[in-house]
Image (cartoon, helix red, strand yellow):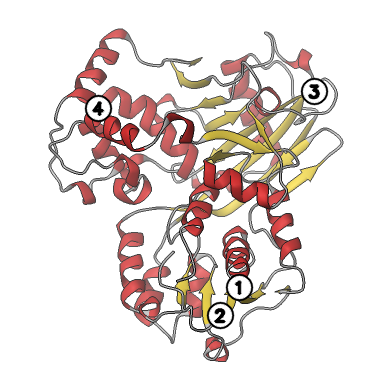
Amino acid sequence: MIGNLNFKNKTATIVGAGVSGLLIAYKLKRLGFEVEILEAGTRVGGLLHTLQTPFGMVEKAAHSLLVSRDVSDFLQELGLKLVPVNHGSKSRFIVRGGKIRRMPLNFREIVSTLRHIFKKPTLTKDLKSLSFAEWGQGYLGPAATEYFLNPFTTGIFACSPDELIASLAFPILIPESSDHSLFKHIRSLKKRKKRSERPVMMALENGMQSLTDALANELRGQIKLNTPLQSFDSLSAHGNVILSTPATVTAKLLETVDPTSSALLKQIRYTPLVSVTAFFDRSAFARTPPKGMGFLVPKSQGHRVLGCLFNSSAFPNRANGDLVSLTIMLGGSGDPHAAELSDSEIQNIITNELSKLIGLKSSAKHLEITRHLNAIPVFDLTLQKCRNTLRDGYCSQDGRIVFSNFSANISIRGMIESLCQIHSP
């Protein structure tokens, strides 16, 4: 969150009813604020959208979330039920050499990686300005950067590690001093956090949209749909004003109020992403259907598929009957034109590439294709500069706040945990 709440005026107007807007509105209501949410669209929830089809559940955006104690308590307060990863399905895979592998590194690369983890890194930049790729080269070495960091970054941000500033995207991975090895840093983190407090991967029993549905229910009567903000001046007397809108929309809202921040907001890049949930007969696989959480693909492996989630293996009630559910991702910053492909072109790519990787031998019974042209903000130097400018500009006055997926952590877990730190003075 950028900015500070004005607790002397307990009214708040939230612009945007995506997940971030609903979360902060609910938190403020619990703190005794009178809230109003303005949403230009016809539905709440933003990208979070769960479909119940005759074939099974389809998540159009996030499928699961990391759950800490704060997140668990928050969701329990809303009456939402969490489900853990199915027993025996926690394995994650990386593609190398045309095969999905639990360990993509060979013995020599493992030894080299361990040496990097235990030694003081050789860095050419200040820790705060390192790209995630530079961080990886210094703390893990080239092999682990290629076969772990690269697909890991693609799986979260749909871009490559060299596009991200490490301290922005993954602040927890930045040691206090460049003299500290990664091992020393991880050991210090473990001392601060008990094992029982570490987050675990879980899903919501009725899908991710059940979160935004529950929040909207708690805020019923306070959400105005089909209500775009016509003039920022009309909010001048509305106490706290919280912008929970994408960067492009926020830029337009701030054009006259804070033109410097507005200009930078227009430069924030978003990566496009195609999410395809596919349902197959079990007989569609030459071998047994894949078991585990899924796989990710390093860019060097030459596939258009970025990764694949094994939905029906990982979580219960994701596919009806004896069907197998997978979600395949394409696009990202390295393949931006994937979102322009036709449905049949996307299906052909999926069938061809999955046949090589997991033994698929026939097409899906049903596909749900979702194209997000502006899915995830890129946490780069432009975004960092924009945050600083907002702090010194629009958000310098108490009660003027930006809370969106570019203002802090992009994850639902990160948003909830940051809101849990807010208390009435």
Q: Quadrant of residue 151?
A: top left
- The residues bearing labels 2 and 3 have C-alpha atoms spaced at a distance of 51 Å
Pointer 3 local density, CA inside 10 Å: few below 14, some 14–19, many at least 20: some
Q: Earlier in the sequence, mark 2 or mark 3?
A: 2
State which quadrant residue 144 falls in: top left
Which element is circle 2 on?
loop
237 to 405, vertically: above or below: below
Q: Position of residue 316 (x, y in %)?
A: 73, 28
Q: Nearer the viewer, mark 2 or mark 3?
A: 2
Q: Earlier in the sequence, mark 1 or mark 2?
A: 2
For label 1, the crowd category at 10 Å Cα-Cα, with few meaning under 14, some 14 to 19 and many 20 or more, is: few
Q: Secondary structure at mark 4?
A: helix
Question: What residue is shown with label 2?
Answer: 10
The amino acid beneath tag 2 is Lys
SS assignment at label 1: loop
Give me the C-alpha separation between circle 3 and circle 4: 43 Å
